[in-house]
Image (spheres, grey):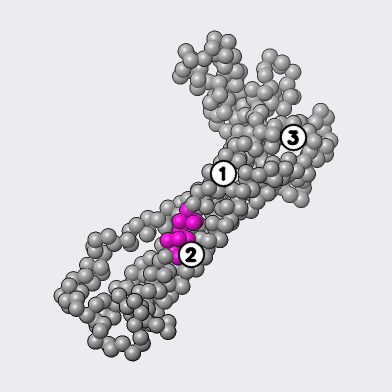
Amino acid sequence: MFAPDFMPASALSPFKCLPAFLPHTVLSQKRKRRKEGREEGDPFPRRQIGSGFIIGFGIQTLVEVSFTASVIGNNAIIYCPYILILIGILSFVMTPVGFYSIILNDNKVMILHMFATFFLASMCGLTTFLGYELNTHVSSLKMENWMKTSIKDDYGHPQAPHVKEDWNKAHQQFKCCGARGMTDFVESKWYIMQKKHPRQRIPESCCASCATMHERFCVAFFKEPGKEEPEKLAQNQTLCLQASNKCLSADTSIAHREVCLHESSDYRLSANAYRHTNGCLEPIRTNLEFFSYRIFIYSICLFILLFVSTITWLVVHEISSPILPFRVQK
């Protein structure tokens, strides 16, 4: 309902944003409970918990998958977590400021909080767009082409050392090699520029670690030997024992570098057993679809929540101290 600017002051209570007929004692009790933070349905803890969740998700995304930006050819996986962390921090800080403005009925702080909330909503809108764009890129053929080109032209390039570092990290984290497989490196400049013969066909990061060998061949053999076929069980036992000759523990060290890189003359050992033979395209795509989808969902939910919150703060402010050409009345 809208009322003209010349409405008599007696129509409103001394507390401005509350009806005049509400008893003064009830107002005092409500204000007291609000100050003590015990009013029923107080959203303060929930907002703080939500802000902490957004910060945690941003940090998780930054740590686990942001390094794949140069691998997939899209920097949104770097921008999104940083923006989400910033949104979470600002939301965590601005929530008590908003309650301060309500408790003390401070119009200046209320206006500041309203504009800050609108700014956070705009940032959430940007993150929503970036999350959607990232999800579209991950599901497209463009990412596969970029990954192959990255290996062919940039892996091992002296002017782009970060590309090699990121690919090596992807090999180790996702237990894979190349975009579609190990043969991707044979056509790369990294392979062509090698002066030592025979040339190394795959990077060392494509070699399985002692922990991976233990997980592949030893765990199933010791825990559930009856579920494997006899031939497969005997093969796993042999590979487990062979790997144990080089591995002192199930750590991140390479299980058998010579066999993996074809530098050993012991042909009793299977070279592929000591390698990551699958390509990185599918595991990276699966992980990034998981993160990009959640970035999109969390951002759009925050955008709607903060946009509605901005309108609410505007209405509350107009009730107490109008700045628009009309007045909003309860």
In the picture, the quarter occupied by the C terminus is bottom left
Q: Is residue 82 left or right of residue 108?
A: right
Q: Is residue 291 above or below residue 41?
A: above
Q: Quadrant of residue 3?
A: bottom left
CA distance for labels 1 and 3: 24 Å
Q: Is residue 1 above or below residue 121?
A: below
For marks 1 and 2, the one nearer the N-term is: 2
Q: In x, y percent, where is residue 290?
A: 53, 43
Residue found at x 57% / y 16%: 236
> What's the magenta region?
298-307
Marks 1 & 3, CB-CB < 8 Å contact: no
Residue found at x 59% / y 48%: 135
Q: In x, y percent, where is residue 301?
A: 45, 56
Check disc 2 and report its element: helix, strand or loop.
helix
Residue 89 visible here: no
For marks 3 and 2, the one nearer the N-term is: 2
What is the number of the mark on residue 121? 2
Q: Quadrant of residue 140?
A: top right
Marks 3 & 2, CB-CB < 8 Å contact: no
Viewer-nearest residue: 106 or 55: 106
Q: Three-letter amino acid code at disc 3?
A: Asp
